[in-house]
Image: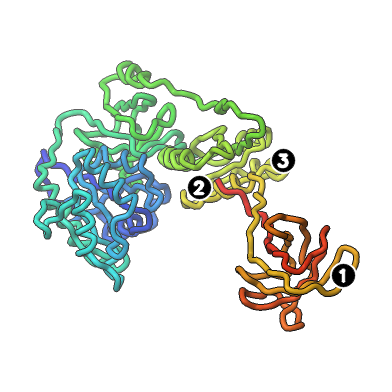
Amino acid sequence: MIKNQNPTTRPPIVVVLGHIDHGKTSLLLAIRNFQFTGEKPGGEITQHIGAYQVEKDGKKITFLDTPGHEAFSQMRSRGAKVADIAILVIDAAQGVQAQTKEAISEIKQTGIQVIVALNKMDKPEANPAKVKGELQKGGILVESLGGKIPSIEISAKTNKGIQELLELILLVAEMEGLKTETDKPGEGVVIESYQDNLRGPTATLLLTQGILKVGDIVATPSALTKIKSLENFQKKPIERAFASDPVIVFGFNQVPKVGEEFKVFPDLASAEKYAQTSKKIERTPEVLEISEGQKVLNLVLKTDVLGSAEAIEEILKSLPQEKIVLRILKSEVGNINESDVKLAASSRALIFGFRVKTDSLAKKIAEREKAKIMTFEIIYDLVEEVRKFMEKILSPEQVRRELGKVKVLVKFISDKNRQIVGGRVVEGEVKKGASIEVWRSEEKVGQGRMINLQRNKKDADLVSKGDECGILFEGNVKIEEGDMLLIFVEERIKGEL
Protein backbone atom coordinates (compact mmCIF):
# COMPACT_ATOMS: atom_id res chain seq x y z
CA MET A 1 0.00 0.00 0.00
CA ILE A 2 1.10 3.56 -0.69
CA LYS A 3 1.83 5.62 2.38
CA ASN A 4 -0.14 8.78 2.98
CA GLN A 5 1.63 11.82 1.62
CA ASN A 6 1.38 15.47 2.57
CA PRO A 7 -1.97 16.68 1.14
CA THR A 8 -0.23 19.57 -0.60
CA THR A 9 2.63 17.49 -2.03
CA ARG A 10 2.28 15.85 -5.42
CA PRO A 11 4.41 13.18 -7.15
CA PRO A 12 7.01 14.36 -9.68
CA ILE A 13 6.27 14.09 -13.39
CA VAL A 14 9.33 12.88 -15.32
CA VAL A 15 10.19 12.93 -19.03
CA VAL A 16 13.09 11.02 -20.60
CA LEU A 17 15.08 12.84 -23.29
CA GLY A 18 18.20 12.08 -25.33
CA HIS A 19 19.71 10.99 -28.63
CA ILE A 20 18.31 8.17 -30.75
CA ASP A 21 19.41 4.69 -29.64
CA HIS A 22 21.02 5.92 -26.43
CA GLY A 23 18.60 3.82 -24.42
CA LYS A 24 15.53 5.96 -23.67
CA THR A 25 13.09 3.17 -24.52
CA SER A 26 15.15 0.58 -22.63
CA LEU A 27 15.30 2.83 -19.56
CA LEU A 28 11.54 3.46 -19.57
CA LEU A 29 10.94 -0.27 -19.91
CA ALA A 30 13.40 -1.09 -17.11
CA ILE A 31 11.70 1.43 -14.83
CA ARG A 32 8.21 0.22 -15.75
CA ASN A 33 9.21 -3.36 -15.06
CA PHE A 34 10.74 -2.32 -11.73
CA GLN A 35 7.24 -2.20 -10.23
CA PHE A 36 3.89 -0.87 -11.26
CA THR A 37 2.16 1.06 -8.51
CA GLY A 38 0.23 -1.41 -6.38
CA GLU A 39 1.14 -4.63 -8.19
CA LYS A 40 3.72 -6.45 -10.24
CA PRO A 41 3.95 -5.67 -13.95
CA GLY A 42 1.86 -7.77 -16.25
CA GLY A 43 0.15 -7.68 -19.61
CA GLU A 44 -2.54 -5.17 -18.68
CA ILE A 45 -1.33 -2.32 -20.87
CA THR A 46 -2.38 -3.14 -24.41
CA GLN A 47 -2.90 0.45 -25.63
CA HIS A 48 -0.10 2.99 -25.44
CA ILE A 49 -1.58 5.66 -23.14
CA GLY A 50 1.44 7.95 -22.83
CA ALA A 51 2.22 7.68 -19.10
CA TYR A 52 2.62 5.29 -16.17
CA GLN A 53 3.54 5.36 -12.49
CA VAL A 54 5.95 3.47 -10.29
CA GLU A 55 6.29 3.44 -6.51
CA LYS A 56 9.51 3.85 -4.59
CA ASP A 57 9.61 3.93 -0.77
CA GLY A 58 5.87 4.50 -0.65
CA LYS A 59 6.00 7.48 -3.01
CA LYS A 60 4.74 7.71 -6.59
CA ILE A 61 6.69 8.85 -9.64
CA THR A 62 4.89 9.55 -12.93
CA PHE A 63 6.78 8.93 -16.18
CA LEU A 64 5.72 10.33 -19.52
CA ASP A 65 6.10 7.38 -21.84
CA THR A 66 7.28 9.24 -24.94
CA PRO A 67 8.09 6.91 -27.84
CA GLY A 68 11.67 5.77 -27.33
CA HIS A 69 14.13 6.22 -30.18
CA GLU A 70 11.44 7.81 -32.36
CA ALA A 71 10.89 10.61 -29.81
CA PHE A 72 10.87 13.54 -32.15
CA SER A 73 11.37 17.10 -30.99
CA GLN A 74 7.67 17.92 -31.10
CA MET A 75 6.76 15.12 -28.71
CA ARG A 76 9.77 15.79 -26.50
CA SER A 77 8.79 19.44 -26.28
CA ARG A 78 5.25 18.47 -25.41
CA GLY A 79 6.56 16.22 -22.63
CA ALA A 80 8.88 18.89 -21.27
CA LYS A 81 6.02 21.38 -20.92
CA VAL A 82 4.16 19.26 -18.37
CA ALA A 83 7.12 17.56 -16.70
CA ASP A 84 8.91 18.59 -13.51
CA ILE A 85 12.13 16.63 -14.07
CA ALA A 86 13.93 15.59 -17.26
CA ILE A 87 16.18 12.52 -17.38
CA LEU A 88 18.86 13.25 -19.99
CA VAL A 89 19.97 9.80 -21.19
CA ILE A 90 23.42 9.57 -22.79
CA ASP A 91 25.24 6.51 -24.07
CA ALA A 92 28.43 6.52 -21.96
CA ALA A 93 30.33 4.94 -24.86
CA GLN A 94 29.13 7.31 -27.61
CA GLY A 95 28.87 10.56 -25.68
CA VAL A 96 26.99 13.74 -26.63
CA GLN A 97 25.32 13.50 -30.06
CA ALA A 98 23.13 15.76 -32.21
CA GLN A 99 19.81 14.99 -30.50
CA THR A 100 21.49 15.21 -27.11
CA LYS A 101 22.26 18.83 -27.93
CA GLU A 102 18.64 19.38 -29.04
CA ALA A 103 17.40 17.94 -25.75
CA ILE A 104 19.80 20.18 -23.78
CA SER A 105 18.42 23.19 -25.67
CA GLU A 106 14.84 22.21 -24.80
CA ILE A 107 15.80 21.68 -21.14
CA LYS A 108 17.33 25.16 -20.98
CA GLN A 109 14.34 26.76 -22.70
CA THR A 110 11.80 25.24 -20.31
CA GLY A 111 13.95 25.65 -17.19
CA ILE A 112 13.08 22.09 -16.15
CA GLN A 113 15.20 20.32 -13.52
CA VAL A 114 17.51 17.73 -15.09
CA ILE A 115 19.23 14.53 -14.03
CA VAL A 116 21.97 13.13 -16.28
CA ALA A 117 21.78 9.34 -16.70
CA LEU A 118 24.96 7.88 -18.18
CA ASN A 119 23.58 4.72 -19.73
CA LYS A 120 25.15 1.52 -21.13
CA MET A 121 27.77 1.35 -18.37
CA ASP A 122 27.90 -2.40 -19.05
CA LYS A 123 29.91 -1.65 -22.21
CA PRO A 124 33.71 -2.00 -21.83
CA GLU A 125 34.22 1.20 -23.85
CA ALA A 126 31.99 3.31 -21.56
CA ASN A 127 33.79 6.52 -20.57
CA PRO A 128 31.67 8.61 -18.17
CA ALA A 129 34.47 11.13 -17.50
CA LYS A 130 34.70 11.96 -21.20
CA VAL A 131 30.92 12.40 -21.45
CA LYS A 132 30.85 14.74 -18.46
CA GLY A 133 33.51 16.85 -20.15
CA GLU A 134 31.43 17.04 -23.33
CA LEU A 135 28.39 18.05 -21.30
CA GLN A 136 30.38 20.81 -19.62
CA LYS A 137 31.14 22.29 -23.04
CA GLY A 138 27.39 22.28 -23.73
CA GLY A 139 26.57 24.13 -20.53
CA ILE A 140 25.60 21.12 -18.40
CA LEU A 141 27.94 20.99 -15.37
CA VAL A 142 27.38 17.89 -13.22
CA GLU A 143 27.94 17.77 -9.46
CA SER A 144 31.13 15.70 -9.65
CA LEU A 145 32.74 18.53 -11.65
CA GLY A 146 31.57 21.21 -9.25
CA GLY A 147 28.16 21.92 -10.80
CA LYS A 148 24.61 21.60 -9.51
CA ILE A 149 23.25 18.97 -11.90
CA PRO A 150 23.12 15.41 -10.47
CA SER A 151 24.34 12.53 -12.59
CA ILE A 152 24.16 8.77 -12.21
CA GLU A 153 25.73 5.81 -13.98
CA ILE A 154 23.20 3.19 -15.10
CA SER A 155 22.63 0.24 -17.38
CA ALA A 156 19.08 -0.28 -18.57
CA LYS A 157 20.24 -3.66 -19.88
CA THR A 158 21.44 -5.02 -16.51
CA ASN A 159 19.25 -2.76 -14.30
CA LYS A 160 22.37 -1.25 -12.73
CA GLY A 161 21.49 2.01 -10.98
CA ILE A 162 17.71 1.89 -11.64
CA GLN A 163 16.73 1.94 -7.96
CA GLU A 164 19.31 4.65 -7.26
CA LEU A 165 17.90 6.70 -10.15
CA LEU A 166 14.40 6.50 -8.66
CA GLU A 167 15.78 7.60 -5.28
CA LEU A 168 17.53 10.52 -6.97
CA ILE A 169 14.29 11.56 -8.69
CA LEU A 170 12.47 11.61 -5.34
CA LEU A 171 15.29 13.64 -3.79
CA VAL A 172 15.20 16.24 -6.56
CA ALA A 173 11.38 16.35 -6.31
CA GLU A 174 11.59 16.93 -2.56
CA MET A 175 14.04 19.80 -3.10
CA GLU A 176 11.68 21.29 -5.70
CA GLY A 177 8.80 21.22 -3.22
CA LEU A 178 6.13 20.19 -5.72
CA LYS A 179 2.71 21.28 -4.44
CA THR A 180 -0.93 21.03 -5.45
CA GLU A 181 -4.23 22.53 -4.31
CA THR A 182 -6.37 19.59 -3.25
CA ASP A 183 -9.61 21.52 -2.84
CA LYS A 184 -9.91 22.83 -6.40
CA PRO A 185 -11.35 21.19 -9.54
CA GLY A 186 -8.90 19.21 -11.62
CA GLU A 187 -6.96 20.65 -14.54
CA GLY A 188 -4.10 19.44 -16.65
CA VAL A 189 -3.00 18.39 -20.12
CA VAL A 190 -4.09 15.88 -22.78
CA ILE A 191 -1.00 13.71 -23.31
CA GLU A 192 -2.53 11.12 -25.65
CA SER A 193 -5.79 10.62 -27.54
CA TYR A 194 -7.27 8.09 -29.92
CA GLN A 195 -10.47 6.61 -31.31
CA ASP A 196 -11.40 3.49 -29.35
CA ASN A 197 -13.42 1.09 -31.50
CA LEU A 198 -15.74 0.24 -28.58
CA ARG A 199 -15.73 3.33 -26.37
CA GLY A 200 -15.36 6.14 -28.87
CA PRO A 201 -13.05 9.19 -28.59
CA THR A 202 -10.67 8.51 -25.69
CA ALA A 203 -7.88 10.51 -24.06
CA THR A 204 -5.16 10.15 -21.46
CA LEU A 205 -5.31 13.14 -19.15
CA LEU A 206 -2.46 14.13 -16.86
CA LEU A 207 -3.60 16.13 -13.85
CA THR A 208 -1.33 18.98 -12.83
CA GLN A 209 -3.62 20.47 -10.18
CA GLY A 210 -6.66 19.51 -8.12
CA ILE A 211 -8.86 16.42 -8.16
CA LEU A 212 -10.71 14.65 -10.98
CA LYS A 213 -13.63 12.36 -10.17
CA VAL A 214 -16.47 10.40 -11.74
CA GLY A 215 -19.32 12.75 -12.66
CA ASP A 216 -17.09 15.74 -13.46
CA ILE A 217 -17.70 17.66 -16.68
CA VAL A 218 -14.39 18.01 -18.50
CA ALA A 219 -13.58 20.09 -21.56
CA THR A 220 -10.58 20.94 -23.72
CA PRO A 221 -10.61 23.73 -26.33
CA SER A 222 -11.83 21.18 -28.89
CA ALA A 223 -13.79 18.45 -27.04
CA LEU A 224 -15.83 17.69 -23.91
CA THR A 225 -17.37 14.85 -21.91
CA LYS A 226 -19.10 14.06 -18.64
CA ILE A 227 -16.98 11.42 -16.93
CA LYS A 228 -18.94 8.20 -16.48
CA SER A 229 -15.91 6.22 -15.34
CA LEU A 230 -12.23 6.80 -14.67
CA GLU A 231 -9.35 4.40 -15.26
CA ASN A 232 -5.77 4.58 -14.03
CA PHE A 233 -2.75 3.91 -16.25
CA GLN A 234 -3.28 0.15 -15.78
CA LYS A 235 -6.87 0.48 -17.04
CA LYS A 236 -8.22 -0.27 -13.54
CA PRO A 237 -11.43 1.56 -12.52
CA ILE A 238 -10.94 4.35 -9.95
CA GLU A 239 -13.34 6.86 -8.37
CA ARG A 240 -10.99 9.84 -8.32
CA ALA A 241 -7.53 10.93 -9.38
CA PHE A 242 -5.09 13.43 -7.90
CA ALA A 243 -2.41 15.78 -9.21
CA SER A 244 0.33 14.05 -11.27
CA ASP A 245 -1.92 11.04 -11.94
CA PRO A 246 -2.45 9.90 -15.55
CA VAL A 247 -6.05 8.79 -16.16
CA ILE A 248 -7.98 7.40 -19.09
CA VAL A 249 -11.26 9.15 -19.93
CA PHE A 250 -13.58 8.13 -22.76
CA GLY A 251 -16.87 9.33 -24.21
CA PHE A 252 -15.67 12.69 -25.59
CA ASN A 253 -17.79 14.20 -28.35
CA GLN A 254 -14.69 14.01 -30.56
CA VAL A 255 -11.02 13.10 -30.16
CA PRO A 256 -9.32 15.96 -28.27
CA LYS A 257 -6.02 17.31 -29.49
CA VAL A 258 -2.78 16.25 -27.85
CA GLY A 259 -1.21 19.04 -25.80
CA GLU A 260 -4.49 20.81 -25.06
CA GLU A 261 -5.25 21.92 -21.52
CA PHE A 262 -8.36 20.46 -19.90
CA LYS A 263 -10.47 21.89 -17.09
CA VAL A 264 -13.38 20.76 -14.92
CA PHE A 265 -16.54 22.90 -15.28
CA PRO A 266 -19.58 23.24 -12.98
CA ASP A 267 -22.10 22.81 -15.81
CA LEU A 268 -22.39 21.69 -19.41
CA ALA A 269 -23.00 25.20 -20.78
CA SER A 270 -19.70 26.62 -19.53
CA ALA A 271 -17.88 23.49 -20.73
CA GLU A 272 -19.39 23.85 -24.22
CA LYS A 273 -18.31 27.49 -24.35
CA TYR A 274 -14.71 26.51 -23.51
CA ALA A 275 -14.79 23.62 -25.99
CA GLN A 276 -15.61 26.01 -28.82
CA THR A 277 -12.46 28.09 -28.37
CA SER A 278 -10.68 25.87 -30.88
CA LYS A 279 -12.94 24.89 -33.76
CA LYS A 280 -12.15 21.55 -35.33
CA ILE A 281 -10.38 21.97 -38.64
CA GLU A 282 -11.11 19.20 -41.10
CA ARG A 283 -8.07 18.06 -43.05
CA THR A 284 -8.43 18.51 -46.78
CA PRO A 285 -6.00 17.42 -49.44
CA GLU A 286 -3.29 20.04 -49.56
CA VAL A 287 -3.32 22.07 -52.76
CA LEU A 288 0.20 22.36 -54.13
CA GLU A 289 1.49 24.34 -57.09
CA ILE A 290 3.18 21.52 -58.98
CA SER A 291 5.59 22.60 -61.68
CA GLU A 292 5.60 20.71 -64.98
CA GLY A 293 7.19 17.31 -64.49
CA GLN A 294 7.12 17.53 -60.69
CA LYS A 295 6.35 14.15 -59.15
CA VAL A 296 4.13 13.63 -56.09
CA LEU A 297 3.77 10.80 -53.57
CA ASN A 298 0.31 10.75 -51.96
CA LEU A 299 -0.18 9.18 -48.52
CA VAL A 300 -3.10 8.15 -46.34
CA LEU A 301 -1.92 7.96 -42.73
CA LYS A 302 -3.74 6.07 -39.95
CA THR A 303 -2.32 5.89 -36.42
CA ASP A 304 -3.19 4.52 -33.00
CA VAL A 305 -3.14 7.88 -31.24
CA LEU A 306 -2.85 11.56 -32.17
CA GLY A 307 0.57 11.80 -30.57
CA SER A 308 1.89 9.25 -33.04
CA ALA A 309 0.35 11.14 -35.97
CA GLU A 310 1.97 14.39 -34.82
CA ALA A 311 5.39 12.76 -34.51
CA ILE A 312 5.15 11.01 -37.90
CA GLU A 313 3.94 14.10 -39.74
CA GLU A 314 6.65 16.23 -38.15
CA ILE A 315 9.46 13.93 -39.30
CA LEU A 316 7.92 13.42 -42.76
CA LYS A 317 7.97 17.20 -43.24
CA SER A 318 11.74 17.11 -42.75
CA LEU A 319 12.29 14.73 -45.70
CA PRO A 320 13.81 16.55 -48.72
CA GLN A 321 11.09 17.44 -51.22
CA GLU A 322 13.01 19.33 -53.89
CA LYS A 323 12.73 16.40 -56.32
CA ILE A 324 9.44 14.84 -55.21
CA VAL A 325 6.56 16.31 -53.21
CA LEU A 326 5.15 14.31 -50.30
CA ARG A 327 1.45 14.96 -49.81
CA ILE A 328 -0.61 13.60 -46.89
CA LEU A 329 -4.19 13.42 -48.17
CA LYS A 330 -5.63 12.17 -44.90
CA SER A 331 -4.34 11.68 -41.35
CA GLU A 332 -6.66 10.13 -38.79
CA VAL A 333 -6.70 8.03 -35.66
CA GLY A 334 -8.17 4.53 -35.95
CA ASN A 335 -8.01 1.32 -37.96
CA ILE A 336 -7.69 1.34 -41.76
CA ASN A 337 -11.21 1.22 -43.19
CA GLU A 338 -13.18 1.17 -46.44
CA SER A 339 -13.11 4.96 -46.97
CA ASP A 340 -9.31 5.02 -46.55
CA VAL A 341 -8.88 2.43 -49.29
CA LYS A 342 -11.32 4.19 -51.64
CA LEU A 343 -9.48 7.48 -51.19
CA ALA A 344 -6.13 5.79 -51.80
CA ALA A 345 -7.42 4.03 -54.91
CA SER A 346 -8.89 7.19 -56.42
CA SER A 347 -5.77 9.28 -55.74
CA ARG A 348 -3.15 6.56 -56.33
CA ALA A 349 -2.00 6.96 -52.73
CA LEU A 350 -0.22 4.58 -50.39
CA ILE A 351 -1.85 3.70 -47.06
CA PHE A 352 0.52 3.72 -44.09
CA GLY A 353 -0.72 2.51 -40.72
CA PHE A 354 1.05 2.84 -37.37
CA ARG A 355 0.02 0.37 -34.66
CA VAL A 356 -3.40 -0.10 -36.26
CA LYS A 357 -5.19 -2.96 -37.98
CA THR A 358 -6.98 -3.19 -41.31
CA ASP A 359 -10.72 -3.94 -41.41
CA SER A 360 -11.66 -7.12 -43.28
CA LEU A 361 -13.79 -5.19 -45.80
CA ALA A 362 -10.94 -2.74 -46.38
CA LYS A 363 -8.60 -5.66 -47.14
CA LYS A 364 -10.99 -7.04 -49.77
CA ILE A 365 -11.41 -3.67 -51.44
CA ALA A 366 -7.65 -3.08 -51.39
CA GLU A 367 -7.06 -6.40 -53.17
CA ARG A 368 -9.65 -5.53 -55.79
CA GLU A 369 -8.45 -1.97 -56.32
CA LYS A 370 -4.77 -2.90 -55.99
CA ALA A 371 -4.30 -0.34 -53.20
CA LYS A 372 -1.11 -0.85 -51.21
CA ILE A 373 -1.46 -1.03 -47.40
CA MET A 374 1.54 -1.16 -45.05
CA THR A 375 1.47 -1.17 -41.27
CA PHE A 376 4.31 -0.57 -38.81
CA GLU A 377 5.09 -0.83 -35.11
CA ILE A 378 8.11 1.53 -35.12
CA ILE A 379 7.91 5.10 -36.42
CA TYR A 380 11.47 4.97 -37.75
CA ASP A 381 10.58 1.98 -39.98
CA LEU A 382 7.52 3.79 -41.36
CA VAL A 383 9.50 6.92 -42.20
CA GLU A 384 12.27 4.91 -43.88
CA GLU A 385 9.70 3.08 -46.03
CA VAL A 386 8.21 6.42 -47.13
CA ARG A 387 11.72 7.57 -48.05
CA LYS A 388 12.28 4.39 -50.11
CA PHE A 389 9.04 4.92 -52.05
CA MET A 390 9.99 8.54 -52.76
CA GLU A 391 13.35 7.36 -54.11
CA LYS A 392 11.68 4.63 -56.22
CA ILE A 393 9.58 7.26 -57.97
CA LEU A 394 12.68 9.22 -58.94
CA SER A 395 14.22 8.29 -62.29
CA PRO A 396 17.58 6.52 -62.01
CA GLU A 397 20.54 8.73 -62.84
CA GLN A 398 23.09 7.77 -65.51
CA VAL A 399 26.52 8.30 -64.00
CA ARG A 400 29.85 8.00 -65.82
CA ARG A 401 32.75 6.55 -63.81
CA GLU A 402 36.23 6.72 -65.30
CA LEU A 403 38.36 3.66 -64.54
CA GLY A 404 41.78 4.27 -66.11
CA LYS A 405 43.91 5.05 -69.17
CA VAL A 406 45.84 2.83 -71.61
CA LYS A 407 48.75 4.03 -73.80
CA VAL A 408 48.59 2.18 -77.15
CA LEU A 409 51.95 0.59 -77.97
CA VAL A 410 51.14 -1.68 -80.93
CA LYS A 411 48.38 -2.48 -83.46
CA PHE A 412 47.52 -6.05 -84.32
CA ILE A 413 44.61 -7.47 -86.32
CA SER A 414 42.07 -5.06 -87.88
CA ASP A 415 38.75 -6.23 -89.38
CA LYS A 416 35.96 -3.81 -90.37
CA ASN A 417 34.96 -2.02 -87.15
CA ARG A 418 37.00 -4.29 -84.87
CA GLN A 419 40.70 -4.37 -84.11
CA ILE A 420 43.17 -5.75 -81.56
CA VAL A 421 45.66 -3.39 -79.94
CA GLY A 422 48.29 -3.75 -77.24
CA GLY A 423 49.18 -1.17 -74.61
CA ARG A 424 50.21 -0.34 -71.05
CA VAL A 425 47.83 0.76 -68.27
CA VAL A 426 49.25 4.16 -67.24
CA GLU A 427 46.48 5.19 -64.87
CA GLY A 428 43.85 3.38 -62.79
CA GLU A 429 42.71 0.01 -64.12
CA VAL A 430 41.08 -1.60 -67.15
CA LYS A 431 37.90 -3.64 -66.80
CA LYS A 432 36.50 -6.11 -69.33
CA GLY A 433 33.33 -4.86 -71.02
CA ALA A 434 33.99 -1.19 -70.29
CA SER A 435 33.47 1.66 -72.76
CA ILE A 436 36.44 3.33 -74.49
CA GLU A 437 37.15 6.84 -75.76
CA VAL A 438 40.03 7.20 -78.21
CA TRP A 439 42.19 10.33 -77.75
CA ARG A 440 44.87 11.48 -80.18
CA SER A 441 46.98 14.58 -79.55
CA GLU A 442 44.63 15.63 -76.74
CA GLU A 443 41.61 15.41 -79.04
CA LYS A 444 38.83 12.85 -78.91
CA VAL A 445 38.71 11.08 -82.27
CA GLY A 446 36.25 8.26 -81.62
CA GLN A 447 34.51 5.92 -79.20
CA GLY A 448 33.71 2.24 -78.81
CA ARG A 449 33.62 -0.63 -76.39
CA MET A 450 35.90 -3.40 -75.15
CA ILE A 451 34.85 -6.82 -76.41
CA ASN A 452 37.64 -8.74 -74.70
CA LEU A 453 40.65 -8.14 -72.43
CA GLN A 454 43.87 -10.17 -72.13
CA ARG A 455 46.95 -10.10 -69.93
CA ASN A 456 49.96 -12.30 -70.82
CA LYS A 457 47.88 -13.69 -73.71
CA LYS A 458 45.23 -14.99 -71.31
CA ASP A 459 41.69 -13.67 -70.88
CA ALA A 460 41.35 -11.34 -67.88
CA ASP A 461 38.59 -9.44 -66.19
CA LEU A 462 40.84 -6.71 -64.79
CA VAL A 463 44.30 -5.27 -65.54
CA SER A 464 45.93 -2.79 -63.17
CA LYS A 465 48.26 0.19 -63.58
CA GLY A 466 51.75 -0.70 -64.83
CA ASP A 467 50.69 -3.90 -66.57
CA GLU A 468 50.49 -4.49 -70.31
CA CYS A 469 47.29 -5.78 -71.90
CA GLY A 470 45.63 -6.72 -75.16
CA ILE A 471 42.25 -5.20 -76.05
CA LEU A 472 39.67 -6.31 -78.62
CA PHE A 473 38.07 -2.99 -79.55
CA GLU A 474 34.83 -2.38 -81.45
CA GLY A 475 34.09 1.17 -82.52
CA ASN A 476 33.85 3.92 -85.11
CA VAL A 477 37.57 4.76 -85.38
CA LYS A 478 40.84 3.05 -86.21
CA ILE A 479 43.22 3.15 -83.25
CA GLU A 480 46.84 4.22 -83.94
CA GLU A 481 50.04 3.68 -82.00
CA GLY A 482 50.51 6.45 -79.45
CA ASP A 483 46.75 6.94 -78.93
CA MET A 484 45.44 7.20 -75.39
CA LEU A 485 42.41 5.04 -74.51
CA LEU A 486 40.19 6.41 -71.77
CA ILE A 487 38.40 3.50 -70.09
CA PHE A 488 35.04 4.22 -68.38
CA VAL A 489 31.72 2.68 -67.40
CA GLU A 490 28.24 4.20 -67.26
CA GLU A 491 26.12 3.15 -64.30
CA ARG A 492 22.50 3.70 -63.46
CA ILE A 493 22.11 4.59 -59.80
CA LYS A 494 18.82 4.95 -57.98
CA GLY A 495 17.54 8.43 -57.35
CA GLU A 496 18.27 10.04 -54.02
CA LEU A 497 16.20 12.68 -52.27
Between 285 and 432, the one nearer to me in the picture: 432
Could you tell me the amino acid type at mark 1? Ser
Of pointers 3 and 2, the one earlier in the residue sequence: 3
Q: CA distance from mark 1 to mark 2?
A: 57 Å
In-image side of 129 versus 447 (left or right): left
Q: Picture coordinates of residue 17 (x, y %)?
A: 29, 49
Q: Which label was assigned to residue 414?
A: 1
Q: Picture coordinates of residue 61 (x, y %)?
A: 21, 50
Display colour scheme: rainbow
Instruction: Name the image quarter holding residue 446.
Output: bottom right
Above or below for 374 versus 491: above
Of pointers 1 and 2, the one earlier in the residue sequence: 2
Instruction: Name the image quarter holding residue 218.
Output: top left
Q: Residue at x 46, y 23 (%)?
A: 281
Label 1, residues with CA under 10 Å away: few <14, some 14-19, many ≥20: some
Q: CA distance from mark 3 to mark 2?
A: 25 Å
- Answer yes or no: is residue 40 visible: no
Q: Which label was assigned to residue 383?
A: 2
Q: Residue at x 23, y 31 (%)?
A: 186
Q: Residue at x 30, y 51 (%)?
A: 100
Q: CA distance from mark 1 to mark 3?
A: 60 Å
Location of the C terminus (image quadrant)? top right
Q: Which residue is mark 3?
A: 369
